[in-house]
Amino acid sequence: MQSHYSSGGRRRTGASGAPKNRSYSPQRQSQGRGRSKATINPSRFINRATEHVEQPPYVPTHSFADFALNATTQNMLEHEGLTTPSAIQDQAIQPILEGRDLIGLANTGTGKTAAFLLPIIEHLVQNRDRNSVLILAPTRELAQQIDAEFQRFSAGQKIYSVVCVGGANIARQIRDIRRNPHVVIGTPGRIKDLISRRVLILNGMTMFVLDEADRMLDMGFINDIRMIAELLPAEKQTLCFSATMTPGISGIVQSLMKDPLTVSVRSNETSDHIHQDVIEAHSKEHKIELLEAMLRKDGYDKVLVFGETKFGVQRLADKLTNSNLPAVAIHGNKSQAQRERALKDFKTEAVKIMVATDVAARGLDIPDVTHVINFDQPQTYEEYTHRIGRTGRAGKSGTALTFIPSRSY
């Protein structure tokens, strides 16, 4: 395990690995121009990784062949080599096929998208209803991922979808909606915009899906969701998927769902198996110098760097690229096409560094990230855990490093 040192070449820890005798009492730090934000005690950014304990494999009670899916879907699953459902698929597909409202509690990367898309596709093949399914997701990237999976699973069945997200050409989205697709997939803000323009009419919707519901609430979409839900028919099937059951989710459940079945396959994800440490820097320039030195080391094969602002993230990515460390940036000022291209380059390892705002912290499944580096500290410890959860996935080890200001001893 590599060690990381302070600007003075020393790293002082107690027996537990936590910092020793540091003056970390101030709880707010200046951000310039009079702004300040709450700070997190840096000792919480340090953790010696424990061995990842493998969980016994889930034993499903069904195979995909057991579900009442049409022959084309079954052939697609067989062609894709999908014979055994994951836990969320095993427990959720049949109730959804039966028309039940359902709450699915599952971690990212557990196959939950297929758990709701396969029954939706079956419903559409049977009914052919246009503009009958609305799927809300918190981010553009997740909406695009859902659409890609929909196209994959529905291939050859002549059912169509449209993706409606901010940052993309709204005129094209309006044109696509007017072609009456079967499924509308979008982010709450853009869906609300299309409703206000009287382009998207919801009175024919028979299925409503909230994916990553906890993240949508975190991002402040609760009022948009409620407004959208009020325009939907009373008689509809509602599916809500979330990593956690928060009070906000409970409120949505009570107001939108009828006698929902709860399926929980959420594992107790922990960051204990992620090696976490801090790096001390005495200035912004010093942080960049230390970051560049790290990124040139062996083992930094796929690195996700988090920054606080859109401008700062873009500037850092440009600086790294100009220093012969090719990097892509993903943030809210990027167009949809630019964000998709950046994600593709990072996922396929065309570049090994992606610099991002917290838009990339949740909802995306990026495999094999070796390091998460917090160039700027997150606003909350919860956001910290979401950030570092991009590494150490699927039983693999990972490293999370956080820059902190140098302190005197």
Image (cartoon, rainbow, N blue to C red):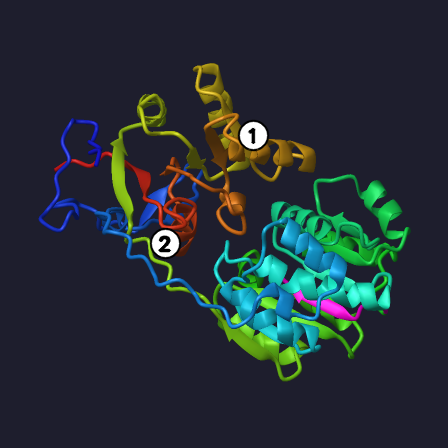
Residue 65 visible from this viewpoint: yes
Ranked by sequence position, the earlier of labels 2 and 1 is: 1
Q: Give the x, y percent position of residue 314.
A: 53, 29
2 and 1 marks in contact (CB < 8 Å)? no
Residue identifier under label 1: 345
Residue identifier under label 2: 381
* Left or right: 297 in relation to 235: left
Q: Tell me the amino acid under the disc marked 2.
A: Tyr
Q: Residues within 10 Å of mark 1 (few under 14, many from 20)?
A: some
Residue at x 50%, y 40% (from the top left corner): 357
Q: Classify the position of the N terminus by image quarter.
A: top left
Q: Give the x, y percent position of residue 151.
A: 73, 49
Q: Which residues are magenta?
A: 204-211
What is the secondary structure assignment of the residue under circle 1? helix
Residue 221 visible from this viewpoint: no
Q: Residues within 10 Å of mark 2 (few under 14, many from 20)?
A: some
Q: Give the x, y percent position of residue 263.
A: 53, 74
- Give whichever of 177, 74 is nearer the camera: 74
* Left or right: 278 in relation to 110: left
